[in-house]
Image (cartoon, grey):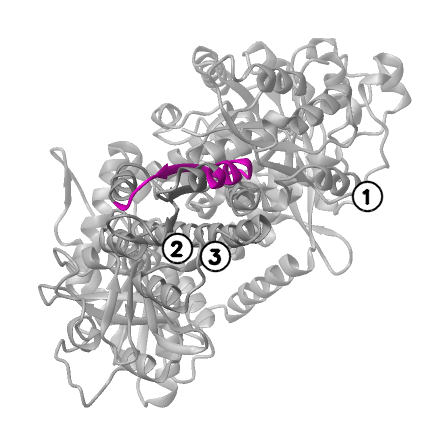
Amino acid sequence: MKSILVAESSPTRRRALAALLTQKGWDVHAPGSTLACCELLRHAHARGLSIEAVVLGWPELLTPDEQDLRELLHAENLQHVPVVVFADEGSEAIAQWRMTRARTSLLSWSDYTHITRQIEHAGDQHVLATPATRPQSPQRVLLVDDSPTVRTAFVKLMRNHGYIVEAANSAADGLRLALAKPFDIAIIDYFMPGENGPSLIAALQHHPQTRHILSAIITGTYSDEVIVESLASGAVECLFKSETRDLFLARLASLARSVQDRKAIDAERRRLEGILAAVGDGVFGVDNDGTILFINPAAVQILGHADARPLIGSLAAECIHPGSSGRWNPDEPGPLARCYSDGTSLPHWQSIFWTASRLPIPVEGTVYPLHVDGARRGSVVAFRDVSAQRKLEEQLRWQAEHDSLTQLHNRAWFERQLGVELQRLRQQDENGALLFIDLDRFKYINDTAGHSAGDELLVEVSKRIRAQLRPGDQIARMGGDEYAILLRNVLPEGIAALADSIRTAACTAPFSHRGKTYRITLSIGATSISGTTTSPEAAMAQADLACYRSKTSGRARCYVFDPQLDDINSMTEELGWSARLQEALVQDRFELVFQPIVPLAGIEHETGEQPASDLWQRQFLRNPDEPALYEALLRLRGADGDLILPKRFLPSAERFGLMAEIDRWVIHRAVRALQEVRGHHRRIALTVNLSADSLADVSLADFVTDCLVRHDVDPEALVFEITESGTLADIVGVKALLTRLRQLGCRIAIDDFGTGFSTFAYVRELDADILKIDGSIVHGLPDDPLDRTVIAALASIAEVTGKRTVAEWVESLETLRVLHECGVNYAQGNAIGHPRLQLLPQVPSAVAGEARAAELAVAAPPARLAAADKVVPIAPAARR
């Protein structure tokens, strides 16, 4: 495994890089200090460690240890190691350092996920630069001459100029020596006893072991006949014993350069052959007629042949790509065959190739025309089998359009189909119907019988409903326990009967699980759709409103939307909120306010005479070792500048599928707020609520990682709050998401703790750090003894399991005291502090006089909040 050193001072960024590189197969070494990085580089060899790449976070201030690290990376033994410098933005200092060190590249923190590509790019640059500096090996020369004097003189001359020379005194001795040892050049005397020089050259050219040797004749007589005979035998040069030594050496150097050029060409050919053999893509070459000239092993394997012999010399159009039918018609050449004959290129084409067993496989590739010395010499085809990719694409397409549990189509697909259907109805004189179905009492069964029973129930109900549909009708699971059905060719007066028949048939038999039976009932809301239906959103709002009427009328019934009776204004308001929320996301009109969550240790020192508005600051001061914890709450900035509470707009956001996008806005803004107070002397942490849509978002953990890395915020400063209802749809997926967030360093809080049948099983199922006791239980304090007992029991459970507790909706000082006596760790509510726009408080003189003023930072006074923020307790439905 390749080893890499990560030298980055920020724990958040260091942790994110280490996780990413480990996932890519690197052995990551990420010491916590620059000094430790220097020590690791100095002693890596002694420890048997080979560092093959370094990631260097560029600091804002250069420390002595940072200077040492840079000098180490300049050392000769580390010059070959690629270094990727990370910075928020480039600078002159970075540019200068990169100019003084090869194999160094710069990457912005915003693009940190491209790190492996950047390392590979640096490595490629090094490989390309290597041949220019590689020393050339000396040439080996065989001298054959029957004269001892000639042999001695020329051997000495050539050796003095760097050649490795061996001599033979006859043609037979020369051939024996050439077969025994490697030579690059042979200089052979023309006149020798026995066989003459041309005979030896011919023998060398004939033998496969020596035919690579460049041969030259050396003679003492200038004769046209000698020169012609020598060149005809295979000699490439004629040398003369009487010529000057400088001319002889110049001719010899020319031969040596030819040898070097040939070796370079041979090496390049072998390299290309190796690449061609090793590359995973198929490659074959054809002449202008489409006859296969060469084919690499990958192509042979992809096409299912044992070797290349059946393909070489065959027409590619006949044996590889005869067409989609598999039968070749020479009168109808395909696009590839036309490229061969026309000499045109064809990038990124897709086609069908046929294997040796005459099975079709999907491929994609490129055709390049091949030119040699300006003349077209055929084409090269590079292709790859995309069967697995096509299968994966089909699988991903299926997953993108289906619910994995019930195998039904999902909400996104259904909304698209509804839009298509409305377009069709505008062209046809037909009517249809849209049904929204809600499974009654699902939460009770899910809580009492467990999540596995809930999953089985959803699957069973899906099968029962689908069995009642006609050909052409469409069904989808919209999320949780909700379904939608699109019915074609249904008159308005027939909707109620058809919907009720579906409901009755699906609910006839009870649901059984582990020996227990449960009665199934459905609430159905329906609306008629036609060419006059204004939009998919309007139809869904009508069906949703009808379903709501069905449930509020007693459940287990059908209700058809009636535009004359139902509140069309409420539907219009819903659609208006949808547009406003989308505009708010684009125009950044949301705001975060922060409500303090204070530790209760020291609350006994509150006398009731101090200003109530400063209680939260006094509690922070009494617990200096605790982080200052706030809940980030969402508000919408209205046209008049007031902040609108989320209970006004979140139901619409949930209805129209905007929650995941809003949650991402909140997370990003919360991380930015934490970055702004990063230099504060006291640790500050924020809790952020996650909706059910975000908990189902498999990419959320990557988004959180990216936010923390970009803004260099400690993950422990971010706490994610989840509710039980948000995890019901996919408890396995939620657990996987929470595990990734916890591995990142974030903390998890369970909201509304203490309500519902499955509270304790839920706590065991999800590994949380904080339990937020539901305000409905706290609200009865200090007078209700039952609530007091329940809270004490919940706090005890939390303590045993190593979790911290937060009490919500705290409205009085007496309630705070009782909560502290019950063992609760933290509290939140209007008795402690209202939501505020500023994270860092302004210190009133009374507080500063009572405790250490240094524990608080001075910031601008909070901006004006809506009146509701100042007087209305924040209920669970309104908290975001």
Closest to the camera, between mark 2 and mark 1, is: 2
User: Relative to 806, is 206 above or below?
Assistant: below
Which tag, 2 or 1, sits closer to the chain's start?
2
* Magenta run includes residue 146: no
**Does dot 2 land on a helix, a strand or a loop?**
strand
Q: As drawn, which residue projects farthest toward the left? A: 357
Q: Check residue 519 in the rendering and tell me which mark sits there, or answer none.
A: none
Mark 2 and mark 1 residues within 8 Å of each other at the beta carbon: no
Q: Which residue is mark 3?
A: 657
In this rendering, position of residue 428 left or right of residue 36:
left
User: Relative to 155, is 477 above or below?
Assistant: below
**Does dot 1 land on a helix, a strand or a loop?**
loop
* Whole-percent x, y for residue 701 in the image: 49, 40
Looking at the picture, which amino acid does disc 2 mark? Ile
In this rendering, position of residue 858 left or right of residue 648:
right
Q: Which residue is mark 1?
A: 863
Q: Badge 3, how many Cα within 10 Å: few under 14, some, many 20+?
A: some
- Cα separation, mark 3 vs mark 1, equals 31 Å
**Residue occupying the point 38% across, 33% down:** 735
Q: Which residue is mark 2?
A: 217
Q: Badge 1, how many Cα within 10 Å: few under 14, some, many 20+?
A: few
Looking at the picture, which amino acid does disc 3 mark? Gly
Q: Badge 2, how many Cα within 10 Å: few under 14, some, many 20+?
A: many
Over which residues does the magenta segment extend?
Answer: 153-171
Any part of residue 872 in sight: no
Closest to the camera, between mark 3 and mark 2, is: 2
